Each structure stands twice: as C-alpha cells, then as structure tokens.
Amino acid sequence: MSTFKEKYVGDKAFYKRLILIAAPMIAQNAITSFVNLLDNIMVGRIGTEQMSGVAIVNQLMFVFNICVFGAASGAGIFGTQFFGKGDYEGQKHAFRFKWYAALVVCAIALGIFAFAGTELIQLYLADSGEVGNLELALQYGEEYLAIMMLGLIPFAISQTYISSIRETGHTFVPMLAGIAAMLTNLVLDYVLIFGIGPAPVLGVKGAAIATVVARFVECAIVIFWTHTNKTQNPYIIGAYRSLRIPKPILKDILITGTPLMLNEMLWASGMATIAQCYAVRGLDVVAAQNISSTITNLFNVVYIQLGACISIIVGQYLGAGKIEEAKDSCRKTTFFSVVCCAAVALIMMLVGTVFPNIYETADSIKDLARVFILISAAVMPVCAYCHCSYFTLRSGGKTVITFLFDSVYTWVIVIPVATILAKYTSLGIVWVFLLVQSMEFIKAIIGYFMVKSGIWLQNIVEK
C-alpha cells in the first residue's frame, strides 16, 4: 500500500502546484462551458430548428477552434521548454510562429466558410420524417455562421497570447479574461436573443453577435495584460520589433510541430465527421446530441485541463533536464485526473436525468439526450486517461506518435466503425453511440503502453 501511495499519490507541495495551475484553467473553461450551456438553453427555448442550426455551426466552429489550438500547440511545446530552461528569446520566437500559424488557419477557415458554408451545414441535415423542418434549420444555421465568421480573427489572436501566458505558469489572467468574455456573452445573449428592453428580438443572430463581441473582449484583455506586465512575460519584450524566426528554431518547430498541427486538425474534423454519422439518423438525433454534448462539455473541463497541466508541468521539467521529476509528475497527475473524473461522472449521471427537461423540444429528443449523457459519463474516466496519455507524449515532443495515437486512430478505427454502424446497419442510434464511445477503451490500452515505454522523456531545447 505504501508503495502504491508513493507512486501515485503526491505530497502537499505537488498538489498545491497542480491546483494553482489547474484551478484557474478549470474555472475558466467551466465558466465558458456553463455560459455556452446557458446560451444553448436560450436558443433551445426558441425551437428545435434554431437549436439544431446553431448546433451544426458550432460543430464547424469547433473544428476551427481546435485547428487554432493545434497551430499554437506545435510552437507551444518549445515555448514551455524554453521557459523551463530560462531561454526567453527562444520563447519569443515560438510566440512569433504561433502568430503566423494562427493567421494561416484563419485565412483558410474564412475561405471555406464563405464559399462552402451552406454545403457543410447541409451535410448534417437528414430527414427522419419525425421531427423538425430541415429548411428552417439550414436557414438559421446560415444566419448564425455569417455573423460568427467575424469572431474568427480575435479568437485566433487571443489563443496565441493565452497559450504563451500559460507556458509561464500564469493561468489566472486567462481565467479572468475568460470570465469577462463569458459574462459579456451571457448578458448580450439574454438581451439580444429575446429582445429585452429596447433591443430587438434577434434570435440566433443575437446569439452570434453576443459570441463575437465576447471574443473581442477576451482578446483585448489578454493583449493589454501581456504588454503591461513585461516582467511576468519577458518574451513579449521586442516581440514585434522583428518578424524573424531563426532558421534552426523554425526548422525544429516545423519538424516537431507540423504533426501536432495536423493531428489537431484531423482529430477535430474527425469529431465533426462522427457527429455527421450520427446526424444521418435525423434532426432529432442532432438535437439530442446537441443537448448531450452541451452538458458533457461542462463536466469534461476537469480532465481536459488536468491533461493540459501535464504539458505545462512535465514540459517544464523536461526543459530543465529533470527526467525523474517529469515521470513522477506525469504518473501522479494522471492518477489524480482519473480519480477526479470518476467522481465527476457520477454527478453528471445525476444531473443528466433532469437536464434535458429545460429545453422546449419533443419528449423523444429529451429521452434520447438522457441516454447519450449517461453513456458519455460512463466513459469519462477512460477519456481522462487517454487525454493524459496524449499530453504526456506531446510534452516530450513526440508529435508523430501523438499523431498516430490521436487522429490516425480516430480516422482508421473510430470513424469507419461510426460510418458502418450509422449508415449501413439497422442498429438503433443508442447502440451506435455506445459502440463508438467504447472505442476509448482500446485507445486507453494503447496509451498505457506508449507512456510506460518512456519514449516521451526527452529535452527538445537542449543545445
């Protein structure tokens, strides 16, 4: 028992450091998810078609958001290790690379949404003959997308700054920026969706306007804090005096970071593809999945941010050459994440039984959403372990392996299973959803052996 405790349970200093980093990140994302939940509920109270149109566009926006995250993450591996090493000049070059990558992603996304937005939305609309009007859902989706495109650039810029701020261990400021943005979003949602006071009733357009304004607010706050607190952010000093990135660093980031950027893009598009597989079963499935994913995203922030903590803590240890400390932190953080998520999953199951009742939609959709929530909660601890494994491998720069572990696994295993079950069998959608979610168990086994091998234990900024 003592050996188990020493191996998997940290001391007070360990948990203090972990909580100081994780708590603001969890709080920020929990607040974001909670406000998104309220936003979703407000739109959901207008009607099934409005909720479905917005849900489809948000699925597309999710792909963009993850691509921006991936664009920053490739250089972020180096930024974290440069900071751990005390090389702020190197961190500055990583920051510049994020700018280039984020703007490229923005340009591509704007082009795709402008010229193929309608076609993308239509991929998720299938007539089950039971509930909802597809033409109306498409119309609302187009209205929502047209406005949401205005928020792509401020989101990309804010993520460039936020990821660099977090590399230094300062997670409190991004949390405050997120809180300010989400409060802005929440207030404007209520006013603009329902037309409170002198404001007109804008429905889904109001929800989109509120989100775009919130993104500008968050962007402004993180930029202002970074440039007025140069002591905490030494990498920002002279960051814009030149756009140059030394060739050796640029080459290293491209070689190591490109697989990670591709991974994030392919994984996100993979999740959208899986959602599209479910959507062919009808608009009622789209609506039920939207309700389920909204509450699931709120509870998932625990394991998502604890996994992200591994990339910060372990990355800093690896950059400082402290290999044993990196291994120990990885093991204990992973164990803590799985245990926490087992408890969170139980709470989610209880909440999930009543949550769908908030929506103004058909009883059949509410019942289906409850089952989706129950299944998602059951696999949450396994997802937590997979997430920690992913960030562990990533922290050591093993981006090709993370590419295989994450997006290749999704496209080669999960998507074919989802496609065959949803489109070519008569299985009920509940069984389809359950079997697709169960693919996480196989991924967890693969992750266990990859992490245990120690292939991720490397310092990639040591010269």
Image: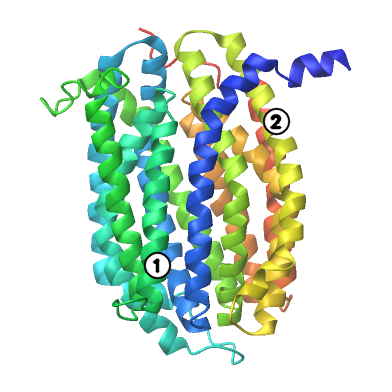
Could you tell me residue 272's position as x and y percent?
A: 49, 61
Q: Is residue 202 visible?
A: yes
Instruction: State which quarter of the image contains the N terminus.
Output: top right
Give the alpha-carbon distance from disc 1 to disc 2, as whole Å: 36 Å
Q: Is residue 215 left or right of residue 169?
A: left
Within-10-Å neighbours for mark 1: few <14, some 14–19, many 20+: many
Q: Is residue 107 left or right of residue 170?
A: left
Q: Nearer the viewer, residue 197 or 182?
A: 197
Q: Residue at position x 76%, y 17% from top?
A: 7
Q: Residue at position x 45%, y 80% from top?
A: 50
Could you tell me residue 48's position as x and y percent?
A: 53, 82
The secondary structure type at the circle numbered 1 is: helix
Q: Amino acid at mark 1?
A: Asp
Choose top left, top right, bottom left or bottom right for residue 348: bottom right
Could you tell me residue 61's position as x and y percent?
A: 39, 60
Mark 1 or mark 2, which has the lower sequence index?
1
Q: Which residue is mark 1?
A: 189
Q: Amino acid at mark 2?
A: Phe
Q: Residue furthest left?
A: 241
Instruction: State which quarter of the image contains the C terminus.
Output: top left
Could you tell me residue 353's position as x and y percent?
A: 75, 66
Choose top left, top right, bottom left or bottom right for residue 370: bottom right
Residue 336: assigned label: 2
The secondary structure type at the circle numbered 2 is: helix
Q: Residue furthest right?
A: 1
Q: Is residue 158 left or right of residue 454?
A: left
